[in-house]
Image (tube, rainbow, N blue to C red):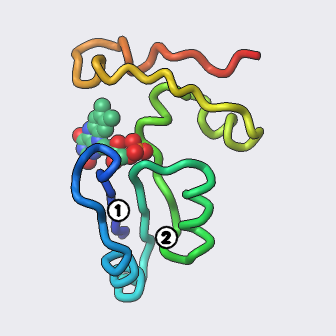
Amino acid sequence: MYVHVVDHSALGAPHVPLEIKQAIRKEFKNTVILAGGHTKESAEAELQSGLADLVAFGRPFINNPDLVDRMQNDLPLSTDLHFDLFYTPDEKGYTDYPVYQQ
Ligand SMILES: Cc1cc2nc3c(=O)[nH]c(=O)nc-3n(C[C@H](O)[C@H](O)[C@H](O)COP(=O)(O)O)c2cc1C
């Protein structure tokens, strides 16, 4: 069992207040996952603060299919993400981004 808190403020939704995340952390004894607009550094900070057991990534995984490898090896992330291809019916903009190339 887990609670997954998604902060969509990077996409224009209202910000999830820190007090809400703290209250969930205090009251919920199982896994807490936070997501929304995270970088490697901000994810680490959430984990170090104790507010989350896990941090999830959404959009960075689309244009960085090797996201874990890039983060583990301090490789740069692609910022070339085509929002116009979201919610379209084929693989374009979802599974056709390249892995890191030097
Ligand atoms: C193309 C696209 C489709 C998504 N579809 C869903 C969905 O069906 N249900 C859901 O809960 N979140 C959905 N999300 C939200 C993501 O799961 C994630 O919470 C959000 O993108 C914030 O994380 P991020 O800033 O790392 O991308 C979608 C996001 C994208 C970009």
Which sits in the foreground, 99 or 42? Answer: 42
Q: Locate residue 61, reporting x and y percent.
A: 49, 34
Q: Quadrant of the C terminus?
A: top right
Q: CA distance from mark 2 to mark 1?
A: 9 Å
Name the image quarter holding residue 30: bottom left
Which residue matches tag 1?
Answer: 4
Residue at 35%, 14% in the rendered image: 91
Q: Which mark is residue 12?
A: none
Q: Locate residue 89, reporting x and y percent.
A: 22, 15
Mark 2 vs 1, N-terminal side: 1
Which residue matches tag 2?
Answer: 52
Q: Locate residue 75, reporting x and y percent.
A: 72, 33
Q: Which residue sits furthest bottom?
A: 27
Residue 93 vertical position relative to residue 7 in the rendered view, above or below: above
Residue at 61%, 50% in the rendered image: 40
Residue 91 vertical position relative to residue 37 in the rendered view, above or below: above
Three-letter code for the amino acid on which mark 2 is drawn? Ala
Which sits in the foreground, 3 or 86? Answer: 86
Residue at 32%, 57% in the rendered image: 6
Dot 2: what SS? loop
Q: Could you tell whether 71 is left or right of 46 in the image?
A: right
Q: Locate residue 84, reporting x and y percent.
A: 28, 18
Q: How many marks?
A: 2
Residue 36 vertical position relative to residue 4 in the rendered view, above or below: above
Residue at 47%, 46% in the rendered image: 57
Which sits in the foreground, 95 or 64? Answer: 64
Name the image quarter holding residue 59: top left
Q: Could you tell whether 46 is left or right of 99 in the image?
A: left
Residue labelled 1 has its Cβ within 8 Å of some atom of ligand 1: no
Dot 1: what SS? strand
- C-beta proximity under 8 Å, tags 2 and 1: no
